[in-house]
């Protein structure tokens, strides 16, 4: 079925991670013909989200040691004498040291099937490469196939796909039967993402909540989980939110406020006051501390105007600078770990002031914290940009492997790819995600590693009147030389876990394996046994029901010239970095696009259908006498795409 693919494009993109998806959307939006392929059977690469069963399949796949070196290489016969091939990797080696643990009765889940799952067939469905359509094979993030990832379906070309955030997860219809209820919190002059603030629909018909969540329940309700491989939040004034608003991609997603900033101090978790109202309403700060904190935060907002305050400390760490500001140890801890969220030993004064200012500038745009979280998980964001690309004619193929890049010896430029069907596809530019490059190409690349853990727990790290909280907590280094650990706790109303549970993500730069880096923090915050640790419910830690640890490659710091033998028209996109935000991915995507098309605007707003002027020649003869009304105009693909229901962000 590969003959259905055109043989020529302007841009070929390999990999569907966030940077690649943004580049693909920008190219299609500027009128380029785009082919976007991925050898995986799900969108997002290492930015993806999985249901519980999908994540178990992903874990099993990454724990297997498979050697693909003996596979047939018939594609080499297609390389001509005046050409050379750059083979691409067939095995994703970006994930290591995967360890998963069940802290309950795992045997009780034997024979338990996922609610609403499709019946398992003896023959797998046809691959995404066989059903190629110029429109995107859209995917509901909560509908998972038995393999890692999700089932795909193909809309008609040019039709607006149903927004990712507006999709109701399969098996959830016994609840309210409607999608999440949006609630705006922005000021009148701000563009407003839809913010989810209602509780998720009940996970079963029974109104009585079970006292204890079992592993079999997690398996049965597995489709209610949307578990991110990479844990991030969106700064409300960050580059990604600005791009979502500018390009109108935000209409494909919905968001929820991160409701709490937490701190871990003296063995206790407590909430950090960060807005003016929070500071003055805080009961944990004295009046003197409130004045100290407000004075320092006011200084940070315009610190550039007062260089005399910090010039003498530019060579010092931010932690040392805070000690000179007459702040109490408690306030220093809040500012360093929960507001600036920087390293105590490595961050310099200016870097810390910049981080604090960024935090403060993001306050109040959409809520009392600087952060938003996309409903159904971070994996929705790459899909949103893929949908924009599809609306403007991009062609998408999942399960479509690329064997090599074909380079013209005379010019030194890449001229084509050869796919796993043996088809040559020509293009002017090629974007390849780092994990697809072979070890030979990456010999001189120095990679960092990210340590990740994902936990399913039975209660929040800080219980309050409301169970529906999205919290971010930075745990200081357990010992000297160790990094701080970022903890993000998600509730069921984020549509990432079943009701009665919490999904907890832990992330830090790696120094050892993920389990060695993160387990000490997990032990401080959570109970890893099935029994209660204390009879005092207020001191009782949340119980971990299930956990997975893994290391993920961080290629964000790799320089282009460190890749061996790449032609000038081949661009490399990195995987996720360890930072909390997404600025690195957006900057990288914009930089690549501007190098390819320096005269084009990066992801401009889609045209307003009412402003499109049509030539008379474009009208059918029988329409020539019809008045030039909105009803008489042919519908543009952009207009069609905006006709679907769901969240949208509009400039007022």
Image: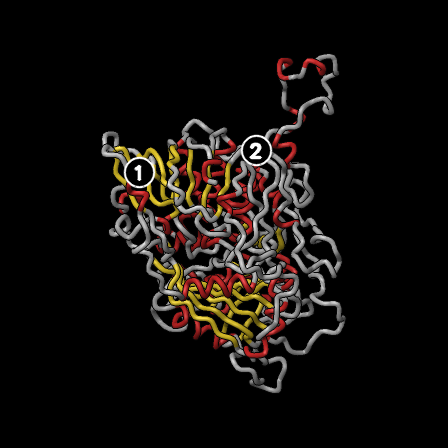
From where the camera sits, is residue 305 visible?
no
Q: Which residue is mark 1?
A: 78
Q: Which residue is mark 2?
A: 605
Residue 320 is left or right of residue 177, and the answer is left
User: Percent x, y for residue 350?
Assistant: 39, 52
Structural crowding at the residue carrying mark 1, measured as other residues with C-alpha within 10 Å and reported as few (<14), some (14–19) or many (≥20): some
From where the camera sits, is residue 551 visible?
yes
Q: Which is nearer the eye, 320 or 128?
A: 128
Residue 90 is left or right of residue 124, and the answer is left
The structure residue drawn at horizontal position 56% and vertical position 61%, both measured from the top left corner, is: 51
Structural crowding at the residue carrying mark 2, measured as other residues with C-alpha within 10 Å and reported as few (<14), some (14–19) or many (≥20): some
Secondary structure state at the residue bearing disc 2: loop
Q: Which is nearer the eye, 547 or 402?
A: 402
Q: Residue furthest bottom?
A: 535
| CB atoms of marks 2 and 1 within 8 Å | no
Q: Which is nearer the eye, 203 or 525?
A: 203
The structure residue drawn at horizontal position 69% and vertical position 66%, both measured from the top left corner, is: 203
Residue 386 is left or right of residue 168, and the answer is left
User: Percent x, y for residue 641?
Assistant: 63, 36
């Amino acid at each position: 079925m590969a003959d259905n693919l055109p043989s020529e494009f302007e841009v070929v993109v390999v990999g569907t991670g966030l940077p690649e998806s943004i580049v693909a959307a920008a190219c299609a939006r500027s009128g380029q013909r785009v082919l976007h392929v991925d050898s995986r059977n799900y969108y997002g690469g290492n930015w993806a989200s999985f249901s519980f069963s999908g994540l178990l399949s992903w874990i099993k796949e990454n724990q297997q040691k498979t050697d693909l070196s003996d596979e047939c290489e018939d594609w080499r016969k297609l390389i001509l004498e005046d050409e050379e091939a750059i083979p691409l990797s067939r095995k994703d080696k970006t994930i290591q040291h995967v360890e998963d643990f069940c802290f309950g009765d795992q045997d009780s889940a034997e024979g338990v099937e996922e609610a609403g799952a499709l019946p398992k067939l003896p023959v797998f469905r046809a691959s995404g490469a066989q059903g190629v359509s110029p429109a995107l094979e859209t995917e509901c993030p909560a509908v998972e196939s038995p393999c890692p990832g999700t089932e795909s379906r193909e809309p008609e070309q040019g039709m607006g796909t149903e927004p990712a955030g507006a999709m109701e997860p399969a098996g959830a219809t016994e609840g309210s039967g409607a999608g999440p209820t949006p609630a705006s919190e922005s000021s009148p002059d701000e563009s407003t993402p839809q913010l989810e603030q209602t509780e998720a629909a009940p996970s079963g018909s029974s109104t009585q909540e079970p006292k204890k969540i079992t592993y079999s329940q997690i398996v049965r309700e597995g489709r209610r989980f949307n578990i991110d491989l990479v844990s991030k939040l969106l700064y409300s004034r960050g580059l990604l939110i600005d791009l979502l608003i500018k390009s109108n991609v935000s209409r494909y997603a919905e968001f929820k406020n991160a409701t709490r900033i937490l701190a871990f101090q003296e063995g206790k978790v407590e909430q950090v006051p960060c807005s003016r109202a929070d500071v003055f309403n805080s009961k944990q700060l004295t009046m003197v501390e409130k004045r100290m904190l407000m004075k320092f935060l006011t200084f940070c907002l315009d610190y550039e105007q007062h260089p005399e305050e910090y010039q003498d400390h530019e060579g010092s760490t931010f932690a040392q600078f805070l000690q000179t500001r007459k702040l109490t140890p408690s306030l220093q801890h809040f500012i360093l770990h929960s507001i600036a969220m920087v390293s105590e030993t490595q961050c310099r004064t200016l870097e810390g002031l910049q981080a604090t200012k960024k935090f403060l500038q993001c306050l109040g745009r959409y809520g009392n914290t600087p952060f938003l979280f996309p409903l159904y998980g971070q994996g929705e964001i790459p899909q949103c940009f893929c949908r924009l690309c599809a609306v403007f004619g991009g062609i998408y193929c999942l399960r479509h492997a690329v064997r090599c890049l074909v380079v013209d010896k005379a010019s030194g430029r890449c001229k084509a790819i050869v796919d796993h069907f043996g088809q040559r596809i020509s293009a002017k530019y090629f974007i390849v995600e780092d994990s697809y490059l072979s070890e030979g190409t990456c010999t001189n690349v120095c990679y960092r590693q990210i340590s990740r853990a994902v936990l399913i727990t039975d209660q929040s790290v800080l219980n309050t009147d409301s169970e529906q909280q999205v919290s971010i907590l930075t745990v200081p280094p357990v010992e000297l030389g160790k990094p701080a650990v970022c903890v993000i706790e998600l509730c069921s109303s984020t549509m990432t876990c079943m009701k009665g549970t919490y999904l907890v993500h832990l992330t830090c730069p790696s120094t050892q394996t993920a389990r060695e880096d993160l387990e000490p923090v997990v032990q401080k915050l959570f109970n890893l046994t099935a029994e209660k640790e204390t009879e005092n419910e207020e001191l009782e830690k949340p119980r971990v029901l299930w956990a997975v640890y893994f290391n993920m490659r961080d290629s964000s710091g790799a320089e282009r010239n460190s890749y061996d033998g790449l032609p000038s028209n081949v661009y490399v996109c990195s995987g996720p970095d360890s930072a909390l935000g997404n600025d690195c991915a957006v900057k990288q995507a914009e930089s690549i696009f501007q190098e390819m098309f320096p005269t084009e605007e990066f992801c401009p707003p889609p045209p307003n259908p009412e402003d499109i002027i049509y030539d008379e020649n474009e009208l059918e003869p029988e329409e020539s006498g019809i008045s030039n009304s909105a009803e008489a105009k042919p519908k543009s693909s952009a207009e069609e795409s905006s006709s679907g229901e769901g969240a949208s962000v509009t400039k007022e």
